[in-house]
Image (spheres, grey):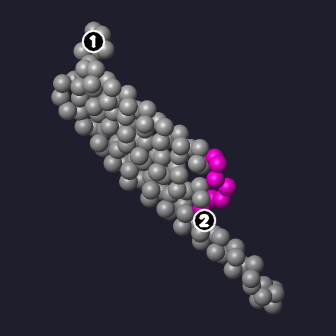
Amino acid sequence: MNLAVTLSPLVAFAVAVLVLVGAALTLVGSLGLLSLRQFYERVHAPTLGTTLGTGLILLASMLLSSALQSRPVLHEIAIGLFITLTTPITYMLIMRAVLQRDTRRIADQHEPEDVKQTS
């Protein structure tokens, strides 16, 4: 069975646009990760690219699967919810850990000499 024959041109166009825009957003997030210098700057771009780009690709997958099977296919919603919830939370936890590390490092640099010797 040839699936291209059974797929509506409107659905094929919508799926293609969603996949291309999702891939472009994910690429922009990856390039932001590579181009930004400091860690604090690097956290923001991949979070947006991953969440929104993956969401659009999953939406395209849902649309295509639903059109080909003639029924709603919703298991991608679980994948999308998992990615949407875990990616920002993971980045927030990493950011807090790095901020705590840097705060300790700055505090150790400004500690008086007599306190450092007694520790």
Mark 1 or 2: in front is: 1
Look at the numbered discs 1 and 2 and tell me whether their residues touch, using CB distance below 8 Å: no
Residue at image position (49%, 62%) is 92
Q: Is residue 23 visible?
A: yes
Q: Is residue 60 magenta?
A: no
> Could you say where residue 36 lies in the image, as x and y percent from the top left?
64, 53
For disc 1, the marked residue is 5
Pick whichever of labels 1 and 2 is earlier in the sequence: 1
How crowded pointer 1 is (Cα within 10 Å; few <14, some 14-19, many 20+) is rated as few
49 to 9, vertically: above or below = below
Query: Which corner quadrant of the image does residue 4 belong to?
Result: top left
Q: Is residue 61 visible?
A: no
> Could you say where residue 106 lies in the image, as x and y percent from the top left?
70, 76
Residue nearest the viewer, comparing 89 with 67: 67
Residue nearest the viewer, comparing 118 with 85: 85
> Could you say where residue 68 lies in the image, as x and y percent from the top left?
24, 22
Residue at image position (24%, 37%) is 74
Query: Which corner quadrant of the image does residue 72 belong to?
Result: top left
For disc 2, the marked residue is 98
Magenta residues, start to end: 34-40
Secondary structure under the numbered disc 1 in the rendered image: helix
Q: Quadrant of the N terminus?
A: top left
Q: What amino acid does circle 2 point to?
A: Val
5 to 68, vertically: above or below = above
